[in-house]
Image: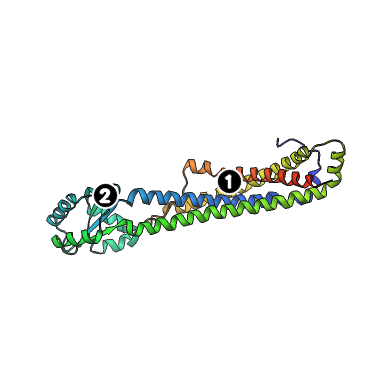
Amino acid sequence: MLGRRTDLPFERDQSTRFLPWIVALMVFLGALMFAGALVVSDTIDSWDSTLTGRMTVQIPQSSATDAATVTLVTMLGATPGVTGVRPVPTSEARALLIPWLGEEVIDSGLPIPALIEVELAAGARLDSSLLAARLSQSVPGTTVDDHRVWLSALINLGRTVEILAFVILGLIASAAIVAVIFTTRSGLAVHAAIIELLHQMGAHDTYIAGQFQIQAMKLSLRGGIAGATAAAVVLLIFAWVGRGIDAAFLPPVTLTIAEWIALLIVPAGAVAIAMLTARLTVLRALARMP
């Protein structure tokens, strides 16, 4: 179909010369928005699966003895709703703080509290304040960090960003539709004499609309390939630059193979939108002709 010639001399039509560039820009922005939404979604899923349903008990260094740890582990294990208790090794606790504070600060003698990781049963709700008060009676200074308190706010923020990304995708698609409509109407005006001649020869409206549809497909496919290629280059650059970033909770700037394949929806959708919009625009315009 790409090599199929049309009966209308579109190569002489200067009104279509900007359509590939417009489609390329739309696909470029749309692909970046879609990739951003995928990254945010992956990050939220990671937070939700690794942190939801967990608590962290912190024992100040001044009270962090083996006996204190054993006491708290025993108390936590007997608490209803708790399915797992694991004392976090000191080396692992240090590794958790390095992305936030840096290795030099950690090695400078910074007091690091002992940590106990607590896993909760699905749907279990424990009051962290009451739990901390009960634990601190046995080991003074013990605190409880309930990840749900601050994680829920981050997840809500991430979901909002994800929704906004798809809203922007919709606006980009709307702008592309407007551009195709304008270009198609310009083409109808330029080729009005030839269209009238085709009508007199017995050509149906669907045939003429098919001519514009093929032209829209060619132009949008050219722009879609260019925009998708540019977006892929930008995403690969981000992935390469972000390789050395090791900051806690920062979303990864890489995509899985399945997500790379999913990004093809953007250029494919742009081509489909251009073809459908061109066809419907021509059919509506021809229906109003005498």
Check disc 1: other Cα within 10 Å, few if <14, some if 14-19, many if 20+. many
Label 2: element kind: strand
Relative image position of residue 197 (x, y in whole percent):
87, 41
Numbered-mark total: 2
Label 1: element kind: helix
Residue corresponding to mark 1: 266
Q: Indicate the quadrant containing the N terminus: top left, top right, bottom left or bottom right.
A: top right
Name the mark nearer the viewer: 1 or 2. Answer: 2
* Quadrant in the picture for residue 93: bottom left
The mark found on residue 190 in the picture is none
In front here: 277 or 217?
A: 277
Color theme of the render = rainbow
- Measure how far apart labels 1 and 2 are at the Cα level: 41 Å
Residue under the point 42% across and 51% down: 43
Residue kind at label 2, given as amino acid type: Leu
Q: Earlier in the sequence, mark 1 or mark 2?
A: 2
The reply to whether residue 17 is in sight is no
Asked if residue 126 is positioned above or below residue 273 in the image, the reply reads below
Q: Is residue 52 left or right of residue 109?
A: right
Relative image position of residue 188 (x, y in whole percent):
79, 48
Residue kind at label 1, given as amino acid type: Val
* Quadrant in the picture for residue 105: bottom left
Check disc 2: other Cα within 10 Å, few if <14, some if 14-19, many if 20+. some
Residue under the point 61% across and 42% down: 268
Relative image position of residue 181 (x, y in whole percent):
71, 50
The reply to whether residue 251 is in sight is yes
Residue under the point 17% across and 52% down: 73
Asked if residue 162 is positioned above or below residue 140 in the image, the reply reads above
Residue under the point 66% across and 43% down: 221
Residue corresponding to mark 2: 120
In front here: 205 or 198?
A: 205
